[in-house]
Amino acid sequence: MLKRIRDRWLISGSSQLMNPWRREHPLRPRWIRTLLSPVVFLGVRAGFRHVDHSYIHGDSRRLHCGQRVSLMDTTFNLVSGHVHIGDDTLFSHGCYVLTGMHRFVNGRRASLQPDLGVAEVPADGRDIRIGKGCFIGAGAIILGGVSIGDNVIVGAGAVVASDVVAGQFIAGIPAEPLRRLV
């Protein structure tokens, strides 16, 4: 049973929202492809193998990519730091690279307590460094302040919350080294 919620539909007994327009128009309209063509061309000229619909939240000048990097549909939060990605690094689908964070004091967001004088979201200091030749598996999450060495494989769905030395295969929540690669 479908139940209308604003412009979306809720399947009864499920939290899955469905957009009726997307259901009726499964393929992107031609005019959207026409608008995206220059963006794809620029991305290919910049050295990207795959140009998809990555999302950048924050100042895009904080994202530093090496050559032959594939970002796919990775989401970048660049509010609290810079992200440095080495050459030949590949991201699979649905990855998150998050420098941002929210500070909590006594269980409440810092912005709700103005007398503390603490910014809820720091402006910098949570940089992420990803080495050369890495592979980031589908759905992986890389948190701020992390450094990943060269030739690291991050398993699908892993949450990287601490530094990783070069040549490791890591997976899990939180991500832990499972095997040395070389």
Image (cartoon, rainbow, N blue to C red):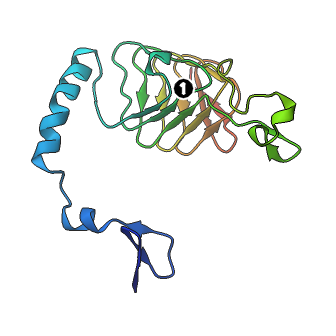
Residue on which disc 1 sits? 78
Q: Quadrant of residue 160?
A: top right
Nearest the eye: 68 or 104 = 104
Total count of labels: 1
- Secondary structure beneath label 1: loop
Residue in the image at 41% along x and 28% along y: 90
Residue in the image at 65% along x and 21% along y: 123
Categorize mark 1 by other alpha carbons within 10 Å: few (<14), some (14-19), many (20+).
Answer: many
As drawn, is 18 to the left or to the right of 125?
Answer: left
Is 121 drawn above or below residue 106 in the view shown? Answer: above
Q: Amino acid at mark 1?
A: Leu
As drawn, is 68 to the left or to the right of 139?
Answer: left
Residue in the image at 36% along x and 67% along y: 7
User: In what quadrant of the picture does the C terminus appear?
Assistant: top right
Residue 163 drawn at (x, y percent): 69, 23
Residue in the image at 39% along x and 18% along y: 88
Q: Quadrant of residue 176?
A: top right
Residue 37 drawn at (x, y percent): 15, 31
As drawn, is 60 to the left or to the right of 49?
Answer: right
